[in-house]
Image (cartoon, coloured by chain):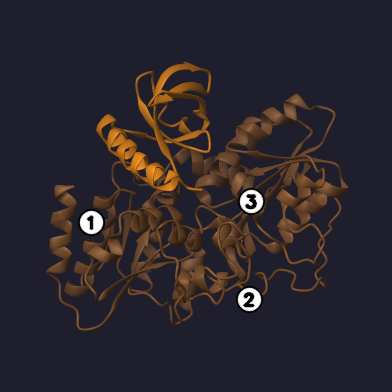
Amino acid sequence: MDNARAWLDKIHAFEFDRPIKIMNVCGGHERSITHAGMRGALPKWLELVPGPGCPVCVCPEEDVYQAIRLALHDKVILVAFGDMLRVPVNVKKGEVRSLAEAQAAGADIRPIASPIDARRIAQDNPDRPVVFFAAGFETTTAPTAAMLAEGIPDNLSILLSGRLTWPAVAMLLDSGSPGFDALVAPGHVSTVMGPEEWSFVIDRHEIPAAVAGFGTESLLASFYSVLRQLKTGERFLDNCYREVAHPGGNPTGRRLLDHTLEVVDANWRGIGIIPNSGYALRPAFAQHDARLLFPDHTDPGRRRAGEMPPGCDCAQVVLGKIYPNQCRIYGKACTPRNPVGPCMVSDEGACRIWWAGGVRVAVDA
Amino acid sequence: MCLAIPMQIESIDGFTARCQAKGVWRDVSLFMMQDTLPVVGDFVMVHVGYAIQKIDESDARTTWELLDQILEENGA
């Protein structure tokens, strides 16, 4: 922790005559920042903004709705990462509004911790269709691709809601009002995809960026790096997680992603379509694509289809436009015990992380 | 969801490695490590049951300490 102290001292030695905002795009980063109480230890002029770092939060409402319907009406075994089970969809009062409620209503829904669990459940139940509802960023989608490439049982299919992180940052930067002065790039996305993926932040937008790990020292080092870049005018993609995030990323993982999946335009809940930001199964794997195998239950005419729940400002939180406690219902109608929006459901959601970190009072935006 | 945990490999059978972290054992897939296959005794970062990168022992131990702190907080 001596090194953490030294990084803090170096950061405090900077002087800026305007507020500086550093965005992170990883729930793990936000958890480390909040857990360590970093905001309280950093200078007043420095703001740490949680951005699009929660794949569960942006998973399309219609995909969650489809998963619920598959489990209820098509009698499949539906498996999903545990975070997805409590994510609410927008339905009339009294209707099943989450996978957890569908499970309580008798649907066969099983939380899993790994794509390997999905394969095992399919192997153990050869007479039943098993659907793996797979939401996640590149770090999680690559293992799903690996499972697919290695070979899966005929009765296992995938409802894929995989997303790429960098296009959301590119969209913010292209908007002209990104809302941040520097970027801390995600450590494990970079471990799989390679840190170079974030070079566009510097090359196209001249915004300082540094890849960070999840320890206090790595994060503080990345803050120092981008602040120094702002101060000197020099720009380069720094890597403060060299021990794990290697140049080129994980070549096998990238090859497996490319072999099994293609990059497509994709919807982000409450935000809309972001170009080239999603994964879809390649035609060679069509026999395992749940979107092709089962009826489409989504009804675009359904009230509030695709949106965040009423009153929930989760989309603004995800884009870093407001802080979690600036949401209109934070800590009032929406708490981890009774979450309204996905940002309060997921362990990666900024609202849930802030609540766990002791922020219990809402403030005006 | 992008949380990764360092584990040490105790045995390998095909692409499946028996791994241990602080007294917890798991079967971990090495299918994503085909370019630089680890060997018994190596430490790997494990995410959703897949090894995604090799890691030094000292870095593994530092990460375990960090995770301990976070788990302690979440349990409180």
Left or right of A201, for residue A109: right
**Residue at the disc numbered 1:** A221
Q: CA distance from mark 3 to mark 2?
A: 20 Å
**Residue at the disc numbered 2:** A311
Residue A44 vertical placement versus A346 (above, below): below
Q: Earlier in the sequence, mark 1 or mark 3?
A: 3
Q: Position of residue A301 (x, y in %)?
A: 83, 73
Q: Earlier in the sequence, mark 1 or mark 2?
A: 1
Q: Which residue is found at the position 73% from the left and 47% from the top? A: A283
Q: Secondary structure at mark 2?
A: loop
Task: Judge depth for marks 1 and 3 and give the one in front.
Answer: 3
Q: CA distance from mark 1 to mark 3?
A: 33 Å
Which hue belongs to chain A? brown
Q: Secondary structure at mark 3?
A: helix
The image quadrant of residue A298 is bottom right
Q: Which residue is found at the position 37% from the left and 74% from the top? A: A180
Query: In the rendered structure, the residue with mark 1 lies on which chain?
Result: A
Are callouts 3 and 2 both on one chain?
A: yes
Query: In the rendered structure, the residue with mark 3 lies on which chain?
Result: A
Chain with colour orange in the figure: B
The three-letter amino acid code for the residue at tag 1 is Ala
Which residue is more in the foreground, A352 or A262? A352
Q: Secondary structure at mark 1?
A: helix
**Residue at the disc numbered 3:** A84
